[in-house]
Image (cartoon, grey):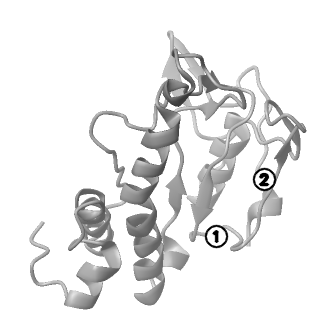
């Protein structure tokens, strides 16, 4: 966890010398160091779940983006520069999508956006995903996925495929029964987004 020996260029890349990006930049840099040392799964969070923008969207969302955009880009850039991105999957996502309408919290400057399980965006880098592409689209209102819909099971099947596992062969106990993620549901590997 000692990042003091990182070069000044690396520290600047992650925004460690800027108030807005220091916390998340440090987390992203530690994530890179963990991956370098063979840790197979690293998950990053921000304190206080700031992405749950039910109110004050006009000020809170830009502030969170300012905290995370530069360090997130730095992580992908750094992994690529070190030749690690081809074998590392970077997934950026949250708990759920957001509605395309505001959630009334009083005056307009306090409005936010409620949860939406019908349309959700994530970005992915490395580890076998095609770079520089967008896949899927919502309806014209931005409420529901309608084009190239990827279900949670499809996404899990795709990740398992990239991990070298067959979604139909991976089983687990659930409520006293042996199941896999396709039990009672369809799941496909989304080949269109793989390189």
Tell me if label 1 and label 2 are in contact, CB under 8 Å.
Answer: no
Whole-percent x and y of residue 66?
A: 41, 58
Q: Is residue 181 left or right of residue 49?
A: right
> Is residue 178 placed above or below 129 in the rendered structure?
above
Q: CA distance from mark 1 to mark 2?
A: 12 Å
* Residue displayed at 40% across by 81% down: 78
The image quadrant of residue 1 is bottom left
| Percent position of residue 85, x then y | 50, 77
Outermost residue to the top: 175
Tell me the tag on residue 118: none
**Residue 62 vs residue 49: left or right?**
right
Q: How many labels were placed on the picture?
A: 2
Question: Where on the picture, by quarter, is residue 195?
Answer: bottom right
Tell which circle, 1 or 2, labels the residue nearer the N-terminal end. 1
State left or right for residue 116 relative to residue 105. right
Q: Nearer the viewer, residue 81 or 19?
A: 19
Q: Position of residue 11 (x, y in %)?
A: 24, 80
Q: Secondary structure under badge 1?
A: loop
Please, what secondary structure does the residue beneath circle 2 have?
loop
How would you rate the neighbour count of disc 1 (Cα within 10 Å): few for under 14, some for 14-19, many for 20 or more? some
Residue drawn at (83%, 50%) of the image: 136
Residue to which mark 1 is pinned: 128
Residue named by callout 2: 190
Residue depicted at 36% across the width and 34% down the height: 49
Is residue 80 at all visible to an observer of this figure? yes
**Place of residue 117 in the rendered image (x, y in percent of width and height, measured from the top left):** 68, 26
Specify the farthest residue to the front.
Answer: 107
Based on the displayed image, in which of its 4 quarters is residue 33 positioned?
bottom left
Closer to the camera in the image, 13 or 135: 13
Residue 164 visible: no
Seen at 28% across and 84% down, the residue is 10
């Amino acid at each position: 966890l000692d990042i003091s020996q990182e070069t000044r260029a690396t520290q600047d890349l992650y925004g460690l010398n800027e108030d807005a990006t220091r916390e998340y930049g440090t987390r992203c840099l530690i994530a890179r160091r963990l991956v370098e040392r063979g840790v197979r799964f690293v998950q990053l969070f921000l304190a206080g779940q700031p992405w749950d923008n039910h109110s004050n969207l006009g000020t809170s969302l830009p502030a969170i983006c300012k905290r995370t955009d530069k360090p997130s880009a730095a992580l992908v850039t750094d992994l690529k520069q070190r030749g690690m991105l081809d074998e590392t999957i970077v997934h950026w996502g949250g708990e759920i999508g957001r509605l395309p309408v505001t959630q009334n919290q009083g005056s307009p400057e306090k409005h936010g956006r409620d949860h939406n399980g019908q349309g959700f965006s994530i970005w992915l880098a490395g580890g076998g995903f095609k770079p520089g592409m967008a896949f899927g689209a919502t309806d014209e209102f931005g409420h529901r996925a309608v084009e190239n819909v990827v279900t949670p099971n499809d996404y899990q099947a795709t990740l398992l495929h990239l991990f070298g596992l067959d979604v139909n062969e991976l089983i687990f106990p659930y409520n006293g029964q042996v199941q896999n993620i396709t039990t009672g549901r369809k799941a496909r590997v989304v080949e269109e987004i793989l390189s």
